Amino acid sequence: MKIYHDLKQGSDEWLKIRLGKFGSTDAQAVASNSRGLTTKVYEKVAELIIGQPKEQYTNADMERGNELEGMARSAYEIETSRIVKQVGYVEIDSYTGGSPDGLVGNDGGIEIKCPSDANFIRFDYTRKINSGYIWQMLHLLLITERKWWDFVVFNEKLNKIIIIRIERNEDKIEKLRVGLESGIDQIKKVLMECKK
């Protein structure tokens, strides 16, 4: 495992390091080990051949999350009395990595979400975490070899933070391992054929 401590997330260098790698946002497709994984394989091969990342989708909640992430991280530190270490990227091989929102001590990490007011209220009421986010955190647990990940949902207007701990689930992490192995094999085969 290699941790890029001083790499700024979103920078050109960060984008370059992520090229062709399965990241935490790919985790649900990887774990399915089916058509979704195959789609991701072609995306990763295209990145490697073209030398540029796939165009990133963004929406108002994502932009809001980027703006408020620092405030949410501070709120988490105050709420838990734990220090969060920011890192740029963690990679475990040439095809797998991830960008944690923060690492906590030797055992944990955090995934921060700062949804719109209505979506925050919905989450506060249901406490239901989107399955894609669960897979994201499991992927981060796999690549960092940590024991737990805190799902942090923050709203600055309400000055409220919700923290839900996700523990390792070895059965699901094994699905990720199998999917990653399959995906990496597929990338290598497609790359070899495309380079002929």
Image: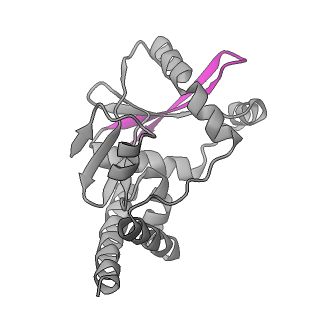
Q: Is residue 160 magenta?
A: yes
Q: Is residue 42 magenta?
A: no
Residue range highlighted in magenta: 147-169
Q: Residue at x 49, y 22 (%)?
A: 73
- Location of residue 194 with respect to 76 vertically, above or below: below
Please state the horizontal and vertical placement of residue 107, each as a whole percent of the image.
Answer: 29, 31
- Location of residue 16 with respect to 161 vertically, above or below: below
Please state the horizontal and vertical placement of residue 46, each as a whole percent of the image.
Answer: 43, 70
Q: Nearer the viewer, residue 7 or 122?
A: 7
Q: Nearer the viewer, residue 189 or 75?
A: 189
> What type of secondary structure mainly makes up the magenta span?
strand
Q: Quadrant of residue 182?
A: bottom left
Q: Residue at x 33, y 67 (%)?
A: 178
Please state the horizontal and vertical placement of residue 140, each as a whole percent of the image.
Answer: 37, 45
Q: As drawn, is 31 to the left or to the right of 170?
A: right
Q: Quadrant of the C terminus?
A: bottom left
Please state the horizontal and vertical placement of residue 109, each as a whole percent of the image.
Answer: 38, 33
Q: Residue at x 46, y 68 (%)?
A: 43
Q: Is residue 168 visible?
A: no
Q: Nearer the viewer, residue 13 or 161?
A: 13
